[in-house]
Image: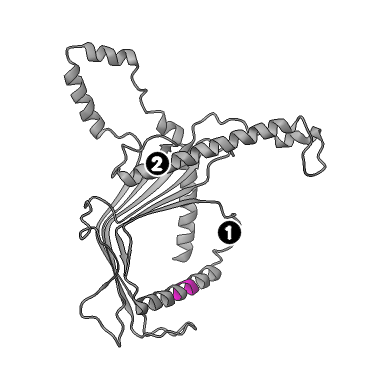
Amino acid sequence: MVQYAKSLSEAMEKSAAQRKSMAPDTTQVTPAPPSAQQVRTQQASATADQTASMARLFNAYDVRETSHHLQITHLDLHICDDTNAKDRGINKRFDGGAMQLSFNSISVDYYPYHKAGETCMHWMHYGEATKSRETWARSLLDEFKSNLEMLKNAVSGQTQSSPQHGKISTGSSTSFSPPPAPKTQLMSSSIVLRMADFSIFQVSTADQPRSSPQSMISCNKKSLYLPQEMPAIHAEFTEYYFPDGKDYPIPCPNLYVQLNALQLVLDSRSLVWLNLFALDLRQSLEQFMELYKLNDSQKPEEHVDIKVDGLMLKLC
């Protein structure tokens, strides 16, 4: 089963590379916007109102770009101690620990062929969180373009004078030549995770059972009179690429997270149990990776821009 999962991951990586290379054919089907003269002609015609209503109806149901969506109405997870398993060397202070996690209205949206820097108003569940992320990502793109232009100017000036560091002659300055401008437009692929409401309950152990679960982390929108359409957690991860596969400079991936009306209750037993669970899980993953030699990847760690916004967070 593990070998099958490894081969499946390799197939998914090849499929992602093929999908990015097919992006130009997908984006070329977008019709060009009407010219100003056409707009004035339509407004002057007698059927302007009818045309406008038909255009609004078409835009409401038009598929502007490829996207994939996953909707989960409700999800319950129960994390329990395996009392029959041998201890892995971690000093467990609780026996028979169990924790319940409840999630409501989870949506995962994937947009593989979005033109970088363009508006996201036609995306599903577009709201204030996506708008805030859009403004931040556009500023990152502008900063990247500015830095790239400064690098080109510095490299072009390198041919006129010798470098400050190292004994490199001006004849070898061709190795510092800036990459050619790409002929295709920069694309982005985004994954959007939205969660309307969730609750992580306090741990229940054999020596201290709970007749009714009490929340440790939950969303407090109702008591704060916040709109129900506001998600408790909104996260967007975006990476950039060029469809032709050339090694052009691209911006770093970015991650935007928005947390709304979350409440954390500091229950010491739950925190200690979660820490022990995380240590045990990490040890199991390390053994799994070492056993099947899955940690031999030579890929360098890449920089990721991260921004986290919080609204009405509460600590008890």
The residue under label 1 is: 297
The reply, left or right, for residue 270 in relation to residue 142 is left
Magenta region: which residues? 280-284
The reply, left or right, for residue 175 in relation to residue 32 is right
Q: Position of residue 126 (x, y in %)?
A: 30, 42
Q: Residue at x 41, y 38 (%)?
A: 114
In the figure, residue 293 lies in which quadrant?
A: bottom right
**Three-letter code for the amino acid on which mark 2 is drawn:** Glu
Q: Is residue 150 above or below residue 98?
A: above
Q: Residue at x 23, y 15 (%)?
A: 43
Q: Is residue 160 above or below residue 249?
A: above
Q: Is residue 29 visible?
A: yes
Quarter of the image where the N terminus is located: bottom left
Q: Residue at x 53, y 42 (%)?
A: 251
- In this view, the residue in front, 85 or 50, is 50
User: Looking at the rendered structure, which numbered label has been put on residue 309?
Assistant: none
- In this view, the residue in front, 77 or 215, is 215
User: Looking at the rendered structure, which numbered label has been put on residue 134?
Assistant: 2
- In this view, the residue in front, 213 or 146, is 146
In the figure, residue 215 lies in which quadrant?
A: bottom left
Q: Position of residue 140 (x, y in %)?
A: 49, 41
**Three-letter code for the amino acid on which mark 1 is drawn:** Ser
Q: Residue at x 24, y 14 (%)?
A: 42
Quarter of the image where the C terminus is located: bottom left
**Is residue 300 found inside the magenta-colored segment of the image?**
no
Q: Secondary structure at mark 1?
A: loop
What is the chief secondary structure element of the magenta stretch?
helix
Q: Position of residue 80 (x, y in %)?
A: 33, 77
